[in-house]
Image (cartoon, rainbow, N blue to C red):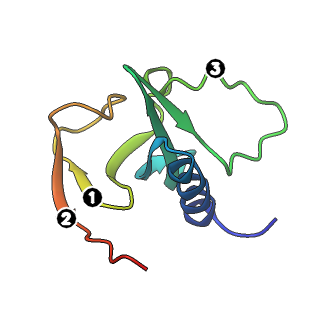
Amino acid sequence: MRGDCEDHALALADWLIGLGKDARVVLGHGLGGGQAWVVVREGEKTFLLEATDKRRVRRWAYPLAELHPEYQPESMFNRHLWWENSGGLTTDYARDQWVPRAVYLAKPL
């Protein structure tokens, strides 16, 4: 019941990755300021998952990322890669404007 958007996004993405989903934490602007959210790729579709929106009346469309231009992504990461958005405003989290900037190598336990 505690934590901010980054905490919620990290926990949600980690859980989804553990389930075998292509989930990524995205950092950018949305909901009036700096924000973190999760995107999940399922085939050709990308879903935007927002865990910290506390509005009582939800006017939330189906969570397809393309339906939410109010979210302005700057960078995103998963357990192995960090990408930077080099192309400005977008609702497409799979285009060439996402440039890999860092690779993380996991050590086996």
Distance, label 1 to label 3, CA atoms, is 29 Å
Tell me whether the residue at label 2 lies in contact with that at label 1, contact meaning CB atoms closer than 8 angstroms: yes
**Placement of 56 over or under 32, stated as above or below:** above
Which residue appears at 68% of the width and 25% of the height? 60
> How many residues crowd around disc 2 within 10 Å: few (fewer than 14), some, or many (20 or more)?
few
The residue that label 2 is drawn on is 102
Which is nearer the N-term, disc 2 or disc 1? 1
Instruction: Name above or below for residue 70 compared with residue 85.
Output: above
CA distance separating discs 2 and 1: 6 Å
Give amino acid for label 2: Ala
Instruction: State the SS at label 3.
Output: loop
User: Can you identify the residue that label 3 sits on?
Assistant: 61
Q: Secondary structure at mark 2?
A: strand
Please tell me whether residue 37 is drawn above or below residue 34 in the rendered image. above
Q: Give the number of callouts.
A: 3
**Secondary structure under the numbered disc 1 in the rendered image:** strand
Q: Label 1: which residue?
A: 81
106 horizontally vs 17: left or right:
left
Q: Residue at x 68, y 51 (%)?
A: 52
